[in-house]
Amino acid sequence: MHIYNTYMRALLLSLPLLGLSSLGHTEPPEPTEGKTVTFVTIDAVPWAAKHPETGEPFGAFVEIVEALEQRTGLNIETALTPFARIDREMETGSHDCAMSIPRDKSLVVHGETLVTHDIGVVSLKNSPLGTRSALRNKRLSIPRGSSISQVLEGDFNLQVEHDTNYLIALHKLQRGRVDGVAGAVPTIFYIARKNNMYDMLAPPVKLSDVPLMLQCSRKSDNLDLLPVLNEAIRSMGKDGSLKAITDKYDF
């Protein structure tokens, strides 16, 4: 009996050590406090842009990043770039993560969707284009380099004018030189508000929607932090703070 009791005592004392060695996956995750992650996103109001006077970044992206820093303890450094450069940044791993429309899975690991915004056509209240069928034979301003014209031209016999920015397009709409402005609806409305043109606009005709999502470069040294960031985004969705930010900027 003495030998049995001694054996059982030794076994019980060894259990915590056995648990630690055999169940290593139950250990708490490595703390994220103070770690630095680099984000890049598209330079497009009201998602993200630099203030023309101060040079400081502003927009929905900026406020989402601030909230993620608070929830994760990470230090997130951000950069804005034209859309065409996002793939290059992810391919080289020069930035850890992007907030953008989904990029190819050969370049990134997809994370949580932050917001979905509308692509559509905005017209004037006094001559609204209320439905997709109303676009037929109309003159539309479309951002230079956009693929929207490829989607619509065949079916709608559009007269398309390519403009370098939405403000030029809105001025043409105001003067009756085009019937509508096609593109990212939140951006069109934001620019219209800033230039006292919002009240002249009719509700948009929706063509499609596009998700803006978190995605991290497959070459990032911080790819292991994606689950932490995903969980923070999910928590923002559950408590309504993510919607409060995106609503503020008309997404």
Image (cartoon, rainbow, N blue to C red):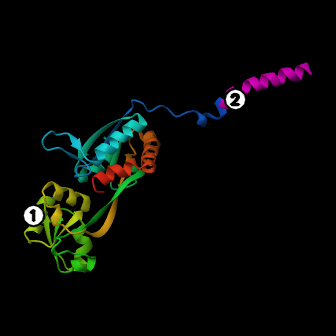
Q: Which residue is mark 1?
A: 171
Q: Is residue 62 magenta?
A: no
Local packing at callout 2 (Cα closer than 10 Å; few below 14, some 14-19, many 20+) is few
Q: Is residue 14 magenta?
A: yes
**Residue at position x 27%, y 76% in the image:** 132
Percent x, y for residue 111? 42, 50
Seen from the viewer's position, the closer of residues 51 and 137 is 51
Q: Is residue 245 visible?
A: yes
The quarter in which the N terminus is drawn is top right
Name the side, left or right, on which 62 lies relative to 170: right
**Residue at position x 8%, y 71% in the image:** 177
> Residue 40 is drawn in which quadrant?
top left
Look at label 2 and name its amino acid: Leu
Whole-number angstrom distance, CA of label 1 to CA of label 2: 73 Å
**Residue at position x 20%, y 60% in the image:** 188
Look at label 1 and name its amino acid: His
Q: Residue furthest front?
A: 199
Name the side, left or right, on which 226 lies relative to 152: right
Q: Secondary structure at mark 2?
A: helix
**Residue at position x 32%, y 42% in the image:** 39
Q: Which residue is mark 2?
A: 18
Q: Residue furthest right?
A: 1
Percent x, y for residue 174? 10, 67
Magenta highlight range: 1-19
